[in-house]
Image (cartoon, rainbow, N blue to C red):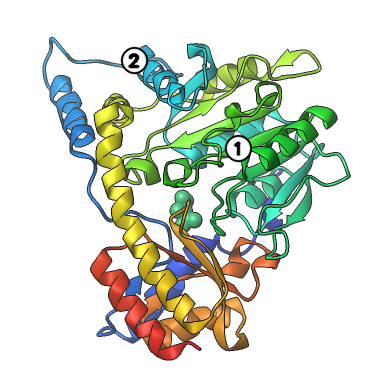
Amino acid sequence: MKINGNYQKLEENYLFTEIALRTKKFCAANPDAPVIKLGIGDVTLPLPEIAADAIIKAFEELKHRETFRGYGPELGYGFTKAAVVDYYKNYGVELAMDEVTIGDGIGSDIANVTDLFEKGANTVLVPDPVYPLYKATSLMDGQKIVYLPCTAENSFTPAPPDCPSDMVYLCSPNNPTGATFDFEQLQQWVDYANDCSAVILYDNAYERFIEENDKPHSIFQIKGAETCAIEFGSLSKTAGFTCVRSGYTVVPMGLKANGISLNRMWQQRQTTKYNGAPYPQQRGLVAALSPEGMLQADKNIAEYKKNSALIANVLQEKGIFYSGGTNSPYIWFRCSNGMNSWAFFDFLLNEANVVGTPGVGFGACGENYFRLTTFNTYENTEEAMERIRLIIS
Ligand code: MLT
């Protein structure tokens, strides 16, 4: 047996696993500590009612002989793909049904799509800091990683480098910094990718949080993206589906490598290795993406934005540099008192009983930074920020 030795290159634990372990250890040692979690970006508000009702109705259908269903189409039901196609029309993007596949969220699809690319043979641009999955899967595949520093100096929205690459991960609005490319900046990336025949893997998990009009909601709003980009969308943060699991991936027909269609390859991959997203989840997705579903989802997002204001107010009052919160559910800030990220994690946990995410966990350039999520309840966020306010300077 020959194992994939690349796994030896991974950190001992994935970032959120490490945080969970450290939190568990702290809670075991301090059982009465009133711990508040602003670490992993997990939602706390219930599903939009219309989506929850659709899911319940779908399960109800499965109880009866007349409405029961077995396997669904591996790439998603037609009605689900049509809902995604319709949703994109809100942003002036016209997709063909066959360009959309339905899955169980961005995490799996963005990892699974790497099957399309030769292992150990590609140079991958990974922003630093960024959602740790991109680095981990590139390491697992033995790809050559080139890090793309995202710093306060470039407002965490770096321009394309001078050197070519084969694959580029972009996440905008960005996790963790909250920075969001404008149309012009994203156009530069699309031009870069087309020039060097790279593919952009575009993580679009947070688009629904965008408030500013000069920020694109989809890479397919950018001219030329249909020949260089794959976009991943999810209902997790948009409509609170973190436990339901539902998302979609768009692989355009125009995306080819040496004349071979990546859309076709993705279809081959999914029909072989995946049995399709569960029917009730797909019904939930359709309801959530409907105009009424989006109204309800946006109300939840507006609630989370109140938490952004609570966090931002304390950081402003203390004169601490931060970004995010406007177009994203994360606030990214410099650790106070000159602490490094993990020291600040321990400091907040011990002194305020608040769990956050150390910036260095998202990449070396995240050292001395820290991330707080706005997804907890208003009451918990308010309480957490009151405690943090007393101990940071
Ligand atoms: C995060 O906290 O960065 C993400 O929510 C985690 C995830 O989506 O897997």
Mark nearer the N terminus (1 vs 2):
2
Q: Would you say 208 lies left or right of 223 here?
A: left
Q: Is mark 2 within 8 Å of ligand 1?
A: no
Q: Amino acid at mark 1?
A: Tyr
**Residue pictured at 48% horizontal, 83% vertical:** 318
Place of residue 376 in the rendered image (x, y in percent of width and height, measured from the top left):
32, 62
Place of residue 34 in the rendered image (x, y in percent of width and height, measured from the top left):
27, 80
Q: Would you say 120 lies left or right of 96 here?
A: right
Place of residue 355 in the rendered image (x, y in percent of width and height, measured from the top left):
41, 73
Tell me the number on the disc at residue 391.
none
Q: Secondary structure at mark 2?
A: helix
**Label 2: how many residues lie within 10 Å, few (<14), some (14-19) or many (20+)?**
few
Q: Is residue 68 above or below residue 51?
A: above
**Residue pictured at 64% horizontal, 67% vertical:** 366
Place of residue 32 in the rendered image (x, y in percent of width and height, measured from the top left):
25, 85
Q: Secondary structure at mark 1?
A: strand
Quarter of the image with the N terminus in it: top right
Q: Is residue 110 above or below residue 43?
A: above
The image quadrant of residue 333 is bottom right
Query: Which residue is under mark 1?
Result: 202
The image quadrant of residue 223 is top right
Q: Is residue 1 visible?
A: no
Q: Is residue 67 above or below residue 248?
A: above
State the residue lying farthest toward the right: 163
Q: CA distance from mark 1 to mark 2?
A: 24 Å
Q: Amino acid at mark 2?
A: Phe
Q: Would you say 292 lies left or right of 245 here?
A: left
Between 377 and 142, the one nearer to me in the picture? 377
Q: Is residue 106 above or below residue 132?
A: above
Tell whether label 2 touches label 1 (CB within 8 Å). Answer: no
Query: Which residue is under mark 2?
Result: 79
